[in-house]
Image (cartoon, helix red, strand yellow):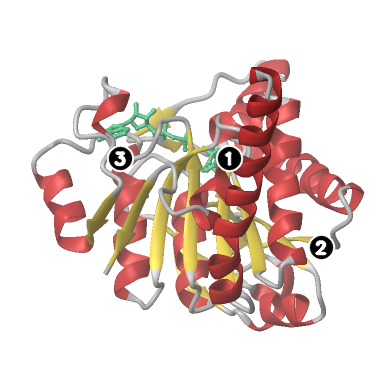
Amino acid sequence: MSSEYEKIKQEEANRVRILSEALPYIQRFAGRTVVIKYGGAAMKERALKEQVIRDVVFLSCVGMRPVVVHGGGPEINSWLGKLGIEPQFKNGLRVTDADTMDVVEMVLVGRVNKEIVALINQAGGSAIGICGRDGNIISARPRSEEGIGFVGEVSTINPQLIESLINAGHVPVISTVASDETGQAYNINADTVAGAIAAALNAEKLILLTDTPGLLQDYTDPSTLITHLDIGKARQLITDGIVAGGMIPKVKCCVRSLAQGVRAAHIIDGRIPHSILLEIFSDEGIGSMIVA
Ligand SMILES: Nc1ncnc2c1ncn2[C@@H]1O[C@H](COP(=O)(O)OP(=O)(O)O)[C@@H](O)[C@H]1O
Ligand SMILES: CC(=O)N[C@@H](CCC(=O)OP(=O)(O)O)C(=O)O
């Protein structure tokens, strides 16, 4: 037999192994809710965007119940720039005055949300775009820090509308603009909202897509990926300063959602094509999985 023939046989065997490895996961997770936070780096490139969307449609097709919570920080920055407004952040949160709030709402609800919805529908899914204000799914209150304007935190989540959409076969796509009881709009960090929604839906998984391989023991060295950890270890990583910067709110929201009943939280690299499928449906996974 030629070596070329051997190579083709080997490739076929690998393809079959990958498909077959997925079966127990597909069976185990059918009917389960998965909340995916999509934002930041994984959203910048069109090709990557389409792959993330295909993964979401795939989850739907194999009987899982995906919910997408999206950010869009880089796109907000770009539109603020076009309007001559300099983006400002305090401790990773966007300082949101009244003009900035208008732009945040226009960009997240009017553009980013509808683009994701259109891509899911184009890929054969059925997505419905909503924001925290729709059906009062998210009630906001102002954060306690001084001088950050209309930055909110989640006061309550009302999961009924989200559940009705899922039960009717749709993929809810949620922007993180929410109202307080007076109707004032607030800008809430998308990781925080994803964690709160995962908890309110009693989700099987919370998946945060970001721009690193996952949680790293040394964040300058991708080979130090921590593939599995529990809440205790996650808290310790924060205390020891190993988790820093923008990763702190992500790990904290994972820990909070796990404490409220979510079965597993995953921090994975949204720059890797089909990272969601690789994490959920393969034995090794590709990122960090945190469990209670
Ligand atoms: N222990 C760690 N492991 C991985 N990344 C870390 C760690 N500590 C800090 N980070 C930083 O956190 C960043 C991710 O947070 P952030 O930039 O806010 O993500 P996003 O824009 O995707 O929401 C990484 O790019 C990395 O620089
Ligand atoms: C209060 C606050 O900072 N809100 C974020 C909301 C969007 C977001 O979280 O987007 P990424 O996930 O893409 O960073 C912002 O205005 O950028």
Task: Tell whether label 2 touches label 1 (CB within 8 Å).
Answer: no
Could you tell me which residue is drawn at 40 percent across and 59 percent down? 265
How far apart marks 3 and 1 lie (CA) works out to 17 Å
Q: Amino acid at mark 2?
A: Ile
> Judging from the image, what secondary structure is the residue with disc 1 in?
loop
How far apart marks 2 and 3 lie (CA) works out to 32 Å
Residue 45 at x, y = what percent? 69, 24
Residue labelled with disc 2: 128
Could you tell me which residue is drawn at 82 percent across and 80 percent down? 168
User: Which of the two residues, 255 or 225, is positioned nearer the viewer here?
Assistant: 225
In primary-sequence order, the first of circles 2 and 3 is 2
Residue 284 at x, y = what percent? 41, 48
In primary-sequence order, the first of circles 1 and 2 is 1
Q: Amino acid at mark 3?
A: Leu
Residue labelled with disc 3: 215
Ligand 2 within 8 angstroms of badge 1 C-beta: yes
> Judging from the image, what secondary structure is the residue with disc 3 in?
loop
The answer to whether residue 102 is seen in the rendering is no
Task: Tell whether label 3 touches label 2 (CB within 8 Å).
Answer: no
Q: Amino acid at mark 1?
A: Gly
Could you tell me which residue is drawn at 61 percent across and 25 percent down? 77
In primary-sequence order, the first of circles 3 and 1 is 1
Among the 4 quarters of the image, the one containing residue 259 = bottom left
Within-10-Å neighbours for mark 1: few <14, some 14–19, many 20+? many
User: Which of the two residues, 128 or 157, is positioned nearer the viewer here?
Assistant: 128
Residue 119 at x, y = what percent? 84, 44
Residue labelled with disc 1: 39
Could you tell me which residue is drawn at 34 percent across and 47 percent down? 249
